[in-house]
């Protein structure tokens, strides 16, 4: 379901528009008492996920229990980075994704499927992995926040990649990236549908359907002066919301 969508190649979504769109979506979701936010880390500062996380905190207050930056295998964020990206959000809400020790395998995609999506180039099985806080944290809402932008490994960043890779473990991360390598960056870049995305979509459909995940996607582009602006905001819980964001991102970023 799509809870909010707005954007075009010429749209400029300002701070008040951003707040309106997010609040409209969250109002539709109804009361939630145990919320987890999964934003990107500081390497995705320009995604505006920091501003959105601050707005989410202001909306839910004490019902926002945890914020888990999707580090993947990156180093934890520093206090300075947290202050700069997530203005006004208490530091005691932030958790660190320990990709070596805090990961659970929630299911395994069989080698036959991997072989089918890679035209026989690979036939290993793939472990779908998540941080245990995402999978076993008992939250009644998981907000995955981030930017949909062309990406060399998965065609278009975000959607379930933010969770399955951003809060995943070494085997899941490495094997998924190798699927992209053997399929070829030139065949994947800018495409929202491709073998790596198919792998993650399959895993999400099989092993994550019971999780209360809602995706908050921004699309960022440059205006006539070269300044970065928000061209789109898409909020929903299914693949359609990602497709819409990816199609706009292709127009403004590729």
Image (cartoon, helix red, strand yellow):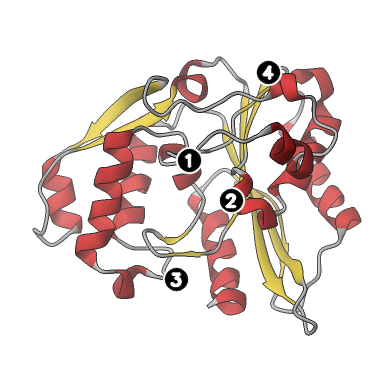
Q: CA distance from mark 3 to mark 2?
A: 20 Å
Reading the image, the residue beneath label 3 is 190
Determine if residue 28 is in view.
Answer: no
Which label lies toward us, 2 or 4? 2
Q: Is the residue marked by circle 1 packed among few (<14), some (14-19), or many (20+) residues within 10 Å?
A: some
- Residue 74 is tagged as 1
x, y (%) of residue 34?
Answer: 68, 18
Which label lies toward us, 3 or 4? 3
Outermost residue to the right: 16
x, y (%) of residue 36?
Answer: 63, 26
Reading the image, the residue beneath label 2 is 43
Instruction: Kindly identify the residue that appears in the image at 58 percent across and 51 percent down.
Output: 43
Reading the image, the residue beneath label 4 is 34
Residue 13 to residue 16: above or below: below
x, y (%) of residue 105?
Answer: 31, 25
Q: CA distance from mark 3 to mark 4?
A: 35 Å
Helix, strand or loop for disc 2: helix
- Whichever of labels 1 and 3 marks the residue nearer the N terminus, that label is 1
Which label lies toward us, 1 or 3? 1
- Whichever of labels 3 and 2 marks the residue nearer the N terminus, that label is 2
* Dots 1, 3 in contact, CB < 8 A: no
* Dots 2, 4 in contact, CB < 8 A: no
Q: CA distance from mark 1 to mark 3?
A: 23 Å
- Foreground pick, 81 / 129: 81
Helix, strand or loop for disc 1: loop
């Amino acid at each position: 379901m799509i809870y909010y969508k707005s954007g075009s190649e010429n749209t400029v979504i300002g701070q008040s528009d951003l707040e309106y769109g997010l609040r409209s979506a969250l109002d539709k979701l109804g009361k939630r008492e145990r919320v987890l936010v999964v934003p990107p880390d500081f390497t995705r500062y320009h995604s505006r996920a920091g501003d959105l996380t601050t707005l989410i905190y202001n909306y839910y207050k004490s019902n926002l229990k945890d914020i888990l930056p999707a580090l993947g295998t990156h180093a934890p964020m520093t206090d300075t980075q947290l202050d700069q990206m997530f203005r006004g959000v208490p530091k005691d809400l932030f958790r660190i994704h320990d990709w070596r020790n805090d990961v659970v395998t929630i299911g395994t995609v069989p080698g036959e499927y991997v072989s089918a999506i890679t035209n026989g180039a690979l036939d290993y099985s793939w472990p779908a992995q998540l941080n245990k806080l995402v999978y076993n944290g008992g939250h009644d809402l998981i907000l995955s926040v981030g930017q949909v932008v062309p990406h060399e490994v998965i065609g278009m960043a975000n959607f379930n990649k933010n969770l399955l890779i951003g809060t995943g473990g070494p085997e899941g991360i490495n094997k998924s990236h190798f699927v992209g390598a053997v399929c070829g960056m030139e065949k994947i870049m800018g495409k929202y549908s491709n073998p790596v995305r198919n792998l993650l979509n399959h895993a999400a459909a099989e092993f994550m359907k019971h999780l209360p995940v809602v995706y908050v996607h921004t699309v960022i582009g440059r205006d006539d002066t070269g300044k970065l602006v928000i061209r789109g905001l898409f909020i929903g819980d299914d693949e359609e919301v990602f497709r819409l964001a990816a199609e706009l991102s292709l127009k403004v970023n590729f």
